[in-house]
């Protein structure tokens, strides 16, 4: 066996995986060029702080509502057809944002293009679980998460450069044009490269009722879900306002904020593969607990970061929160029933993100009280979720 073949096998890079990762880079690059600056764009188009809270809340709520049908469609019609449909939805959202430069229209378009990650995630996990053996599942999820960070790192840098060169409104509209083109390329590549499963009629048994899927959820998975909800409260209460903190409180430029995002993503990418290698060979719970601690302490550190130098340290910490995120997703797959993994994955995210959307909406009101109130409240929720999983969380050995 050649060195390159051994390396591909180590990383789980089968044909379907390579096609999936290519799609993630292309669509993600276009999305992240504009997505991280959407709060600034909304304000430039006449929206206020509540429009930013509305955007973040809708992002979480719709991500939740899209997660279950995303899993259902993957179970029912196959991941290849499902991914085709999801890409078309994202492209429609980009087109609306390009053609109508109004903050209300941008939110309407965001309802479509911001859903891409959530609605395609169950199908992506389905590709991984059915293309790789159990002993490579964490590595497969890790490679998906690793590659997602490439556009997360580069997209905001390019988007920030567009803003500095052309101004906020024109620069972000140009980013949407590029996003539409990249999504179209991804659509054709994924359909040409991804191999569909054989005997679909015998394999796909999509469940239309999320309540029935929830009843199939194991007690161990429910305990993980409860902790995850609390930790996501910690993440989402300040999420949309991090860019405002950096630009307004710490006085960094849009390009510097893009570089801070790159620091976060590079940090995450450096730790992904070593952690996946260990998690596939040991228990997953310790890696998830460590991840929850990193989630928890980011808002507290951000509160005391008022210069570029201290923000770099804060965003390194933010990157470290990805320490066990692929492991958590792999644990969800492990604890889900066979032949319903995409549906159960979508059900998990449906329940989690519907609840967490309240935190995103509430974050705007907490921010209006004071940024410190927002960040400290987030820190408190993180502590509760982390210690709940530490004391009650289970693993699949």
Image (cartoon, helix red, strand yellow):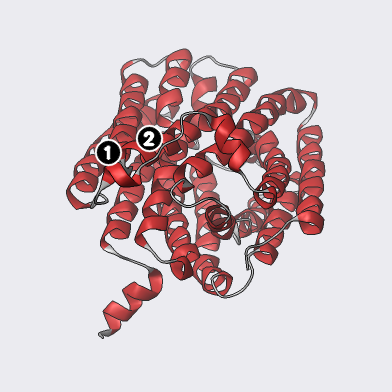
Q: Please give the residue where the numbered disc 2 appears in the rendered image.
A: 73
Corner quadrant of residue 19: bottom left
Q: Quadrant of the C terminus?
A: bottom right
Q: Is residue 305 visible?
A: no
Q: Residues within 10 Å of mark 1 (few under 14, many from 20)?
A: some
In the rendered view, tell whether residue 374 sits above or below residue 388.
above
Residue 189 x, y percent position in the rendering: 20, 47
Mark 2: give few (<14), some (14-19) or many (20+) Cα within 10 Å: many
Query: Where does the image place residue 260, in percent across and percent down from the top left?
Result: 55, 51
Whether residue 219 is visible here, answered yes or no, is yes
For image coordinates 76% across by 44% down, the residue present is 303
CB-based contact (under 8 Å), mark 2 and mark 1: yes
Of residues 88 and 94, the one drawn nearer to the viewer in this rendering:
88
Residue 9: x and y in percent read 34, 74
Nearest the camera: 321 or 387? 387
Disc tally is 2
Q: Nearer the viewer, residue 16 or 378?
A: 16
Locate residue 80 relative to residue 224 in the image: left or right: left
Residue on which the image places disc 1? 81
Q: Secondary structure at mark 1?
A: helix
As drawn, the label of residue 337 is none
């Amino acid at each position: 066996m050649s060195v390159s073949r051994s390396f591909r096998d180590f990383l789980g890079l089968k044909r379907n995986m390579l096609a999936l990762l290519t799609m993630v880079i292309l669509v993600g690059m276009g999305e992240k060029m504009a997505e991280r600056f959407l709060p600034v764009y909304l304000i430039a188009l006449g929206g206020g702080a509540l429009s930013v809270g509305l955007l973040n809340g809708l992002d979480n709520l719709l991500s939740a509502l899209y997660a279950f049908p995303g899993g259902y469609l993957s179970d029912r019609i196959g991941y290849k057809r499902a991914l085709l449909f999801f890409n078309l939805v994202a492209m429609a959202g980009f087109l609306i944002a390009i053609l109508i430069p109004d903050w209300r229209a941008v939110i309407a378009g965001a309802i479509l293009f911001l859903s891409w990650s959530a609605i395609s995630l169950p199908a992506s996990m389905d590709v991984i679980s059915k293309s790789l053996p159990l002993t490579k599942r964490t590595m497969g999820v890790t490679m998906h998460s690793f590659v997602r960070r490439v556009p997360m790192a580069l997209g905001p840098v390019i988007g920030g450069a567009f803003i500095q060169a052309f101004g906020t409104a024109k620069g972000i509209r140009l980013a949407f044009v590029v996003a539409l083109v990249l999504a179209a390329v991804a659509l054709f590549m994924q359909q040409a490269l991804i191999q569909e499963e054989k005997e679909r009629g015998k394999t796909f048994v999509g469940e239309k009722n999320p309540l029935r899927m929830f009843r199939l959820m194991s007690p161990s998975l429910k305990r993980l879900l409860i902790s995850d909800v609390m930790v996501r409260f910690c993440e989402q209460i300040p999420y949309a306002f991090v860019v405002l903190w950096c630009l307004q409180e710490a006085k960094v430029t849009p390009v510097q904020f893009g570089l801070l995002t790159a620091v976060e993503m590079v940090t995450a990418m450096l730790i992904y593969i070593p952690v996946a290698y260990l998690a596939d060979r040991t228990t997953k719970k310790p890696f998830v607990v460590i991840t929850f601690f990193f989630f928890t302490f980011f808002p507290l550190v951000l509160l005391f970061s008022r210069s570029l130098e201290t923000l770099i340290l804060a965003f390194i910490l933010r990157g470290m929160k990805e320490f066990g995120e692929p492991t958590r997703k792999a644990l969800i797959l492990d604890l889900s029933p066979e032949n319903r993994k995409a549906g159960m994955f979508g059900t998990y995210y449906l329940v989690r993100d519907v609840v967490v959307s309240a935190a995103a909406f509430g974050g705007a009101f907490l921010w209006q009280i004071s940024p410190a109130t927002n960040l400290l409240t987030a820190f408190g929720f993180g502590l509760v979720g982390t210690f709940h999983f530490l004391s009650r969380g289970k693993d699949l050995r």
